[in-house]
Image: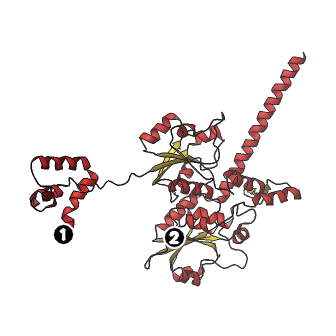
Amino acid sequence: MAMEYESNNWIWDGVYYCPRLFGGLMLTAALLGLSTTYFGGIGLFPLSYVWSDSGIFHKKKCEKKRIRVYMDGCFDLMHYGHANALRQAKALGDELVVGVVSDEEIIANKGPPVLPMEERLALVSGLKWVDQVIANAPYAITEQFMNSLFNEHKIDYIIHGDDPCLLPDGSDAYALAKKAGRYKQIKRTEGVSSTDIVGRILYSVKDTEGGGDHTSTLLNGDSGERCHSQRAQISQFLPTSQRIVQFSNGKGPGPNARVVYIDGAFDLFHAGHVEILKKARQLGDFLLVGIHTDHIVREHRGMPYPVMHVHERSLSVLACRYVDEVIIGAPWEVTKDMITTFNISIVVHGTVAESNSLLPGETDPYAFPKSMGIFRLLESPKSLTTSSVSQRIVANHEAYVKRNVKKAQSEMKYYEEKTYVAGE
């Protein structure tokens, strides 16, 4: 019975996939006086065998068309809000293509970026939901660029958040995509923005100048200003277990997996973090990252760090494609219990860090893995640090203020001269 069913499968494939062709053959057979039962392989087995074997009615193994979606952005000061936006965009299709706006376009539309193109590309490429990156994308979706997306990159839909994106002239940057019916929208992640992060730094960071102990702060000595600073540092992000699950791989290490452990603050997640995590992941099968508590970071680095609190930092690390799991609130010391519990094979640490000095009376946090011979110091691919990123933000802000003051002075001088001439 099973053999008979198998031999007749080609008929039903023909009826379903090629009804017109099959109907034509049946009509031809009827005109020739052949019994349709022959097509079941009863009296005309060789013919049915040839037809079925030829693949005429074999099921077409054409895969379902993969939907390609496109989302662009500046991605300056990359944070978990950007990552969540790209996660949502990827959920609307099968392949996510991300356009990273050029430095020149950002300067023309928003002002100088904190991170140059190279660093922003490293951050976006390092996200687990991104399949392809287009460098130097335009700030506005022009008709020419949109046609390039549709025809060359085979994009089906252009994605953007539900927050408005306006050009300097006040027009919608995605108007053409909407008009073409190829636009889809995602929900903006509340509680974080690049502006918010810049605000936290500008109100609180201590920018060290020169090689001495002299430090200058953006705050004056006024207690009201300091209170304002503390309020500015309070994050509006409310972590939930669902968000953590959304960012997580959901897979543990295999029974014989080589687990690599690296820890740190990972504050203001940047390209240096991505590169060291990539290098660490290459040493094993599973990368476990320990995220230090806010208290530990503050104790070793002082105020105003960390800029991002532990849950914000954890999500940024979890979004990285090289990371398999994180320990939220990891202890400063890598203990025997930790190594046993997580079956850690190797503990690594980068050569570039905010501070490698120990507090008075503090022991080496890597003493135990070193005694086991499983500690390794990794050469950091980049010299970038959270402090250097913060200093860029401060420098950009100071340049912005000077530029605006100069502009205001020029306008005032112009109006004074105009008034004087008019008075004559």
Location of the N terminus by quadrant is bottom left
Query: Residue type at mark 2?
Result: Gly
Density class for disc 2 (Cα within 10 Å; few <14, some 14-19, many ≥20) is few
Q: Secondary structure at mark 1?
A: helix
- The label number, if any, that marks residue 250 in the structure image: 2
As measured in the structure, the alpha-carbon distance from the residue carrying label 1 to the one carrying label 2 is: 43 Å
Density class for disc 1 (Cα within 10 Å; few <14, some 14-19, many ≥20) is few
Quarter residue 231 falls in: bottom right
Q: Is residue 157 left or right of residue 264?
A: left
Q: Position of residue 321 (x, y in %)?
A: 50, 62
Q: Which of the two residues, 265 or 191, is positioned nearer the viewer here? A: 191
Location of the C terminus by quadrant is top right
Callout 1–callout 2 Cβ contact below 8 Å: no
Q: Which residue is mark 1?
A: 3
In the picture shown, does residue 54 fall above or below 110? below
Q: Does residue 76 appear in this view?
A: yes
- The label number, if any, that marks residue 216 in the structure image: none
Query: What residue lies at 46% left-to-right and 46% top-to-bottom?
Result: 156
Q: Secondary structure at mark 2?
A: loop
Colour pattern of the rendering: secondary structure
Q: Position of residue 359 (x, y in %)?
A: 71, 74
Query: What residue lies at 83% left-to-right and 25% top-to-bottom?
Result: 415
Q: Which of the two residues, 377 or 97, is positioned nearer the viewer here? A: 97
Q: Position of residue 12 (x, y in %)?
A: 24, 58
